[in-house]
Image: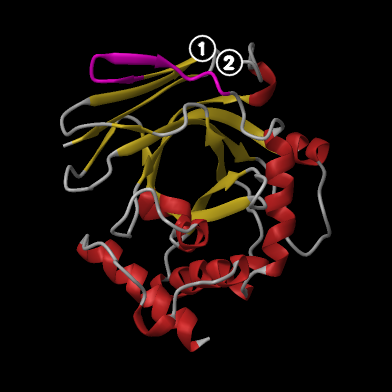
Amino acid sequence: MEKVKLAAEALIKARETNQPLVDFPDDSAPKSIAEAFAIQDEILTSRGAEIVAWKVGPSSKEFPPTCAAITRENLYTSPTQLSKSLRLKAVECEVAFRLAVDLPADEGTYNSSEVKAGIGTAMVAIEAVETRYHEWPVKDPIWALADSQSNEALIVGGEIELDKLEHFPDFHASLTIGKKVKAADKGFPGGDPFALIAWLAGHLSERYPLLSKRGLKKGDIITTGSWNGVDFANSQEKISAVFEGLGQAELEYS
């Protein structure tokens, strides 16, 4: 547990000072997925910040599904600006959902249909991606997971009730950075976004009491993975993610 605290303190300091972390002190680097989640939980406990949103990503050949909590200070309404001092200025365009009901972590597992029934609205989101480490891409995915899965901020657009969406789930989407426009056509990572949220709800039962007692709350926003991969912006470039029939979100690093 002492190593978890050391690693959490190092990541908090790197975030607060914007000074990248080259290595963890005293051999405290996470070596397993469980240790990475324990570091996430220690950071949340130490900072005492209010959780209002989540990011969740699908499994891969090497890795199970991943997630990270997003606190109030890192949730923004579009349009917004972030500091140009951030090193990466990396962005992902995504679809996020707001829960209309609680999904307690202590009430067993959920399925996709149950989660979908509990969704109130959907919205376009831009995830601002940043790392607290010196290297990018992060050399070890376990390190990235410990660092809130490289989340810096979530910017959300206007909301539409889920049952009123015309093109769900097959949106035509694009990402504009400055004068460059590209299609964001990867679709929902992992296929069914509600299955990912169901995994998240069940997963929280295994976390620190801060999360296992909290579960997912009515009003939580959950963003469900990138439709464009990762793209990079320069300072003063306007960034816009547009999903036809859903809306848009806008960001600028300035």
Q: Closest to the observer: 63 or 4? A: 63
Which class describes the residues within 10 Å of circle 2: few (<14), some (14-19), or many (20+)?
some
Q: In this view, does 180 lie above or below 62?
A: above
Please give the range of residues in magenta: 176-186
Q: Is residue 103 above or below residue 33?
A: above
- Per the image, label 1 sits on a secondary structure element best described as loop
Q: Residue 252, percent across and down?
A: 24, 32
Amino acid at circle 2 = Phe
Q: Is mark 2 on a helix, strand or loop?
A: loop
Q: Residue at x 62, y 69 (%)?
A: 34
Residue 189 in which image quadrant: top right
Q: Where does the image place residue 225, in percent across and percent down from the top left?
A: 55, 37
Q: Can residue 38 be seen in this view?
A: yes
Position of 52 with respect to 102 (left or right) is: left
Q: Quadrant of the C terminus?
A: top left
Q: What amino acid type is highlighted by mark number 1?
A: Glu
Choose between 49 and 201: the one closer to the eye.
201
Is residue 158 toward the left or the right of residue 83 in the image? Answer: right
Which residue is labeled 1 in the image?
244
- Residue beneath label 2, please? 171
Please tell me how crowded label 1 is: few (under 14), some (14-19), or many (20+) other residues with Cα within 10 Å.
some
Q: Is residue 194 above or below residue 50?
A: above
* Marks 2,1: beta carbons within 8 A: yes
Q: Where is residue 192 in the image (x, y as percent from the top left)?
A: 72, 32
